Image: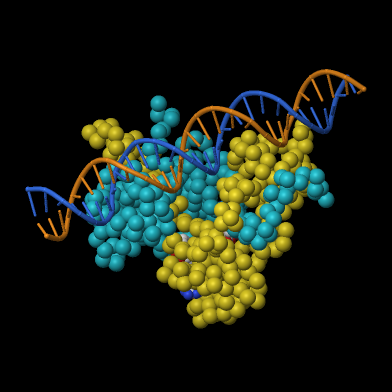
Chain colours: A cyan, B yellow, C blue, D orange
Amino acid sequence: MSESRPRIVPEATVARLAVYLRVLAGLADGGRSSVSSGELASAAGVNPAGLRKDLSYLGPCGVRGVGYSVAGLRERLTEVLGGERSRPCVLVGIGRLGSALADYAGFASRGFQFVGLLDSDPRTVGTEVGGLPVHPAEELEAVVARTGATIGVITTPAEVAQTVCDRLVAAGVRSILNFAPVALTVPAGVDVRKVDLSVELQVLAFLDQQRDGSAPVVAALRADPQESVR
Amino acid sequence: MSESRPRIVPEATVARLAVYLRVLAGLADGGRSSVSSGELASAAGVNPAGLRKDLSYLGPCGVRGVGYSVAGLRERLTEVLGGERSRPCVLVGIGRLGSALADYAGFASRGFQFVGLLDSDPRTVGTEVGGLPVHPAEELEAVVARTGATIGVITTPAEVAQTVCDRLVAAGVRSILNFAPVALTVPAGVDVRKVDLSVELQVLAFLDQQRDGSAPVVAALRADPQESVR
DNA sequence: AACCGCTTGTGAACGCCTGAACAAAGTCGC
DNA sequence: GCGACTTTGTTCAGGCGTTCACAAGCGGTT
Ligand SMILES: NC(=O)c1ccc[n+]([C@@H]2O[C@H](COP(=O)([O-])OP(=O)(O)OC[C@H]3O[C@@H](n4cnc5c(N)ncnc54)[C@H](O)[C@@H]3O)[C@@H](O)[C@H]2O)c1
Ligand SMILES: NC(=O)c1ccc[n+]([C@@H]2O[C@H](COP(=O)([O-])OP(=O)(O)OC[C@H]3O[C@@H](n4cnc5c(N)ncnc54)[C@H](O)[C@@H]3O)[C@@H](O)[C@H]2O)c1
């Protein structure tokens, strides 16, 4: 049934395909016309065999004994990832982080265009960021409807992120990228990806500690339960 | 051998532990003294059984029939994640994204303190961001040595990211958070985590397309090429 | 025209993570 | 003081992702 959609391409693979696509863009700029899986994998930071398996999901798109056509593979990846047409995005919360995103040229060059910036602060509304005017938050639904945006980016404080998310979904947005440190609840059929920078730092701190202290905390806790919390 | 370190806690679990810790902080501020796994899991956006499994890596730290002590679990998680002492971090590349990070209060409140900001632009050097002065990039090694920073954050253009990374590693930094869209090469014993916002958007675009077009591009290519879109 | 070397594409095994069901254990009520 | 309920901690099975290794195919060369 259509409910159980057989995800043919693993999501982890999709993320890597996006990386390959970026590397290919760099190679094309450098004038290269073909690449081997080993070279591509090295530039992308992955295993060559894994790269070939990733690409095999798209069907045969290389030439044995030679490698991959840079232009051909780029076109195929662009098509599969849905980047042939420019995807309109709305950005809610034009603070420090939101301004950095809105002003970033790297998104537009890859087919993502911010078509609406929204904020609730009267001092921010009306200003221009990255060549776009900031609209009042009340116009969220109108902006989504007018631009047909299908991707929403949330860079508001955590307290209002769920409310903003609900409004985005109600307005028709079905893909959301969330920078606020909260778990968003969305109905089925809506995809949320979360970027949590504090978590990234915390994982690094854990790995740091695991290296430094030759006695891992966790092992000690497991082997020696009677050590009180104190 | 010390080469094959038996990772006792899966990295995916570590990332979730950090989320639980943040939720617990919110609960503590709200005056709560205990939580059940179900409630915690709901707030963190994960499965209750999975949460209990995650916590079981730390040994028994809940009370059956009651739940978890908010204060106790928080302390335990903080200890395991290595956040007991404040971790000094250096930030290289004080542009739009770097400024947003340096100015963000959410890191300091979780034990991460930026002790050094570095940039190569003479117009940026000398200014203050988030209460800290920006140092010239040449002083990178000196700043790391003086502050004892073990975590480095890279928000420079992609072209110089590898060079900056090499200098950080040579200076003694062993954990790196990279925002530049390149795969960094580091020696063994150094951990790199990558935040790639373009990839996040591209994955969302793929999911979008997979929903919209009722015939997934990839499936058409693999299974039944003649089956048209409708 | 046939051979040889190189690279892709794929099949299978391995390990990791996730999700669900069950047993242990402690507390609250009577 | 005892029973029953609630919630944890663990065990088991399933799926997913990754890795290794090999066969198939193409180009260049003689
Ligand atoms: N800045 C960082 O480095 C950083 C790092 C990690 C996480 N985050 C998270 O990203 C989010 C934004 O961070 P920031 O530093 O840019 O904060 P910020 O305060 O600078 O910006 C938030 C913006 O959202 C706007 N806003 C508030 N309520 C709104 C609403 N209802 N509708 C529309 N806009 C609204 C505010 O006016 C403000 O401009 C926060 O959730 C923060 O936790 C930021
Ligand atoms: N801004 C975004 O929203 C965004 C989104 C995704 C990825 N990124 C990536 O993050 C990185 C930074 O983005 P940004 O928008 O802040 O760019 P930016 O140009 O605003 O900032 C880069 C800063 O790095 C400094 N710098 C350059 N070379 C340096 C060196 N050798 N040593 C120290 N500092 C140096 C520059 O002076 C500048 O201040 C880029 O790699 C970009 O691709 C940014």
In this picture, residue A176 sits left or right of residue A27: right
> Residue A172 location in percent, x, y?
45, 41
Residue in the image at 72% along x and 43% along y: B59
> Residue B39 location in percent, x, y?
68, 37
Residue in the image at 42% along x and 70% along y: B159
* Residue B111 against residue D9 in the figure, above or below: below
Q: Quadrant of the N terminus of chain A?
A: top left
Whether residue B47 is visible to the viewer of this picture, yes or no, is yes
> Residue B189 location in percent, x, y?
56, 62
In this picture, residue B211 sits left or right of residue B99: left
Residue in the image at 41% along x and 53% along y: A47
Residue in the image at 68% along x and 54% along y: A216
* Residue B65 against residue B79 in the figure, above or below: above
Whether residue A124 is visible to the viewer of this picture, yes or no, is no
Q: Nearer the viewer, residue B177 or D1?
A: D1
> Residue A82 location in percent, x, y?
34, 47
In this picture, residue B66 sits left or right of residue A104: right
Q: Nearer the viewer, residue B127 or A43?
A: A43
